[in-house]
Image (cartoon, coloured by chain):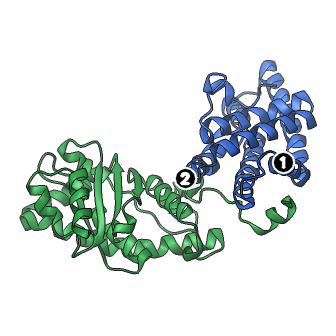
Amino acid sequence: MIDVNNLIENRSLKGNYFAPDVYLQGDNEFGLLENRSGARLLAIPDTLLKGLYTALEAELGNGCGVALFSCGRTWGTAFAKRFADELAEYYEKPLQEMEMIQFLQSMKQCWKSHGWGVLDIDLKYYQQGFIVAKISHSPYVATAPQGKRPMGFLEAGILAAFFSQLTGQNLHCAQTSCESLGAEANEFILGLGDRIKSVPAWLTEGHDHATIMELLCRQQN
Amino acid sequence: MQKDFERLFHRAEDHYLHPLEMTAFRKHLGLLDRRLSTYRYLRDNEGMIFQSVADQLESEFPDVPTAQLEKALLHWISILRYGSMAMLLNNPEYLQYRMLEWVSEVVSAYELQDLETRLADILKQNLEAALSADDFHLIEPFLTQAGVTVLHQAAPHPPEYAMAGDKA
């Protein structure tokens, strides 16, 4: 028989740490923006992002993607640590003890409250060694040059860092569809570098995300 | 901050409140007092309210593992806690962002919709029986809001009316 009083005492009843009305705080007078734990937040104007893409493309050409990926990865590593610390403190348990669904919900809400678009994580291919992430309404892609190539390099770097921290493996991330090329969302595949190294070549051959997933899984078998 | 009070405070500015505004203010104060007493009832009787829900659920779903039942119960204990505060603040967004959007995907992931739909029904019936009609109407819109978001139930009224929270 369930004893409700006992249940209430021993389990967490907390909801969404990243609820925007409480997560984002600030002091207009001082021009400060911070999150509910007091960590500083930075508002990035579209113009700055556009300028970043233009400057990097002018300086590095196609190498711009590698630079952006690397920035995303470095920054994402620090962010993943802060994410883990803040969640552990709020829910009063380490990230490792958190249920997968709670972790994923936190990550999605975190993404949304920071204004990075709507993230969805698909673990259908987890057993084959892949995680699929889908981001729509991405501000990073919206401000990037349109109609050229997949432009979610920053996000790919952040995702790679995030899931590398989580799984303890050095994961890489490849983008397979992009809003800048007219797709509904930006899709990313995460996996060990060796296993997803063929993705760029398949993209060049014109394969879509679904076909690439099929090819990857076949390669594993 | 209470949205209904906020409107009056902002409107006042350089003048004393007009008689009609004073009447509105008094009405909101009365409502706040009733919300507070309903809140206190829900707070003080949480264990009893949910024990009765748990007992009924266990007898209706003998084959469902206890862990599943507990999970579902915890969701609705949380929903009622956040919902009660939303009622007190007269702010549906409080419940929506802090709890409902969060828990709805968890319910789907664990495939608890059927169980939780029945749980929500029992909870609603028990609260309706325990509270006076006026007090029940204060918390009801938030239970409805939870049903719409978490269990994908059809909204019985246009959302702005269902979520107004000051129907009574």
Q: Quadrant of residue A163?
A: bottom left
Asked whether A143 or A95 is in front, the reply is A95
Q: Position of residue A81 (x, y in %)?
A: 46, 76
Q: Position of residue A110 (x, y in %)?
A: 48, 59
Residue at the spot 62% in from the left edge and 42% down from the top edge: B150
Quadrant in which the N terminus of chain A appears: bottom right
Q: Colour of chain A?
A: green
Q: Is residue A31 visible?
A: no
Q: Position of residue A4 (x, y in %)?
A: 84, 59
Q: Position of residue A73 (x, y in %)?
A: 30, 72
Q: Is residue A163 visible?
A: yes
Asked whether A36 or A67 is in front, the reply is A67
Check disc 2 and give the amino acid type: Ala
Count the marks.
Answer: 2
Q: Quadrant of residue A97?
A: bottom right
Q: Chain of mark 1?
A: B
Question: Label 1 belongs to which residue?
Answer: B59
Quadrant in which the C terminus of chain A appears: bottom left
Check disc 1 and give the amino acid type: Ser
Q: Colour of chain B?
A: blue
Q: Name the N-terminal-most of marks 2 and 1.
A: 1
Gap between marks 2 and 1 measured at Cα: 24 Å
Residue at the spot 45% in from the left edge and 52% down from the top edge: A112
Q: Which mark is residue B154?
A: none
Near mark 2 (Cα within 10 A), the count class, few <14, some 14-19 or many ≥20, is: few
Q: Taking B164 as reference, is A22 left or right?
A: left
Q: Chain of mark 2?
A: B
Residue at the spot 51% in from the left edge and 63% down from the top edge: A34
Q: Is residue A81 above or below residue B75?
A: below
Question: Label 2 belongs to which residue?
Answer: B109
Q: Taking A194 as reference, is A98 left or right?
A: right
Near mark 1 (Cα within 10 A), the count class, few <14, some 14-19 or many ≥20, is: few
